[in-house]
Amino acid sequence: MLVTRFEYVNTATQRELLNILKLLEPIAGAKVVWQFLEDDEDMEECGQELAQLTSVAFEFQAY
């Protein structure tokens, strides 16, 4: 399980995160817990986009 909590993600960081997630795809049971501030719609959307680009299971948690 990979738990993430970012305050800011730019496009270069998003590309690198996607590369990391692609490495997790062949691992059975791999899961990403994407945590974001409750009112940070941009960070939630970033996680949603990454989830669509990979087959790794995502769980979204607002805090």
Image (cartoon, helix red, strand yellow):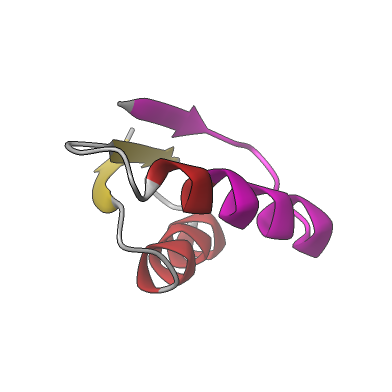
The residue under the point 31% across, 36% down is 33
Count of marks overlaid on the render? 0
Q: Quadrant of residue 31?
A: top left
**Picture coordinates of residue 18, whole percent (x, y):** 58, 56
Q: Quadrant of the N terminus?
A: top left
- Relative placement, left or right, of 13 versus 41 is right
The residue under the point 55% across, 64% down is 42
Q: Is residue 13 magenta?
A: yes
- Relative placement, left or right, of 19 versus 45 is right
**Picture coordinates of residue 14, whole percent (x, y):** 68, 57
Magenta residues span: 2-20
The residue under the point 30% across, 38% down is 27
Residue furthest toward the left?
A: 29
Residue furthest toward the front?
A: 26
- Relative placement, left or right, of 60 versus 46 is left
Q: Is residue 51 magenta?
A: no
The residue under the point 58% across, 43% down is 20
**Picture coordinates of residue 54, whole percent (x, y):** 40, 64
